[in-house]
Image (cartoon, grey):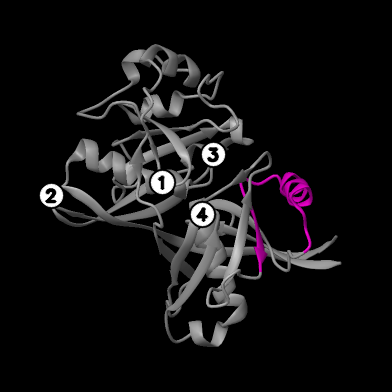
Amino acid sequence: MTRRFFTLDVFTETALAGNPLAVVLDAEALDDARMQAIAAEFNLSETVFVLEPRNPINTASVRIFTPARELPFAGHPTVGTAALLAHVRSPGALAVQDLTIVLEERVGDIVCIVQHRAGRGLAARFELPKLPERLEVAPPSRVEIAEGVGLAPGDIGFDRHEPCLYSAGAPYLFIPLRSLEAIGRARPGAMSWAGKDGPAAYLYTKAVVDPASAYHARMFGGGWGVIEDPATGSAAAAFAGVALAFDRPEDGDHRLVIEQGFEMGRPSLIALGFAVKGGMLRSASIGGSVVIASSGALEL
């Protein structure tokens, strides 16, 4: 059977930058093993399989695979798939207005807004279906973390920021680093906490390359089959909890741009929005630009 696919670059307006993504349309009748094998064949950080929605009022049901495992939720596949489906299914409507796309993921239904932007490329954002939660597990020691990412214990921590574990659908160990130089030296090693179902490592610092950015980040996820990811929307989603805990923002609406992928030659810009009321996180969103890089067909 012929199945259409596209590859996209997400969280960028420039082709061959950002985070690459494969999206396979017409994925009905593919079983779990076949989807996993196709994701391994693409060998990108994630591959999305688009299926008919379980609830007919929604746009599509999607499943997300890394080369090694399925994920219940991921940010750049959500942004990229929403933008692609709007572009493929309703190009005329998108040319004049924003479109709402609802994707059924394992973590729940996700409402996405694909933005009409005259004279510019695709872009989408989505509201988090699940707000970040701090995991009730003690993080590894600074010595263990430093050994796992090739740094010294003294490189870890700044201001009030300390290592912690958060999830907004996928778990991450958040590792604050003192400088851009330190994050550039980091290398994924034997991270004892990062098994197949364990948290990936998300390194971040307030020192940035782009002055418009609030944070600079890297993500190591070898246990997930992703040695390093150019842009990690699910980690940026969970980072709303980190920002609330350590930056203590005032009540109101906030927007942070997180830059990632610079060390890989794939610069990416992720827009994290969140609202705080009564000192509590009330909502959060992830958004960014999308470029269609290629299209073709799987003869499977």
Q: Residue at x 74, y 52 (%)?
A: 35
Badge 2 or badge 1: first in the primary sequence: 1
Badge 3 or badge 1: first in the primary sequence: 1
Q: Element under label 3?
A: helix
Pinpoint residue 131: horizontal percent, then vertical percent.
35, 50
Q: Name the quadrant containing residue 77.
A: bottom right
Q: Which of 248 and 116 lies nearest the eye of the viewer?
A: 248
Pinpoint residue 158: horizontal percent, then vertical percent.
25, 26
Q: Name the quadrant containing residue 52.
A: bottom right
Q: Residue at x 38, y 44 (%)?
A: 238
Question: Of the residues tagged 1 and 4, which is closer to the observer?
Answer: 1
Q: Looking at the rendered structure, which numbered label has been put on residue 209?
A: none
Q: Residue at x 13, y 51 (%)?
A: 278
Q: Residue at x 48, y 46 (%)?
A: 232
User: Magenta segment range?
Assistant: 29-51
Crowd around label 2: few <14 · some 14–19 · many ≥20 (10 Å): some
Q: Which residue is mark 3?
A: 264
Crowd around label 3: few <14 · some 14–19 · many ≥20 (10 Å): few
Question: Of the residues tagged 2 and 1, which is closer to the observer?
Answer: 1
Residue 38 colored in magenta in the image? yes
Q: Which residue is mark 4?
A: 76
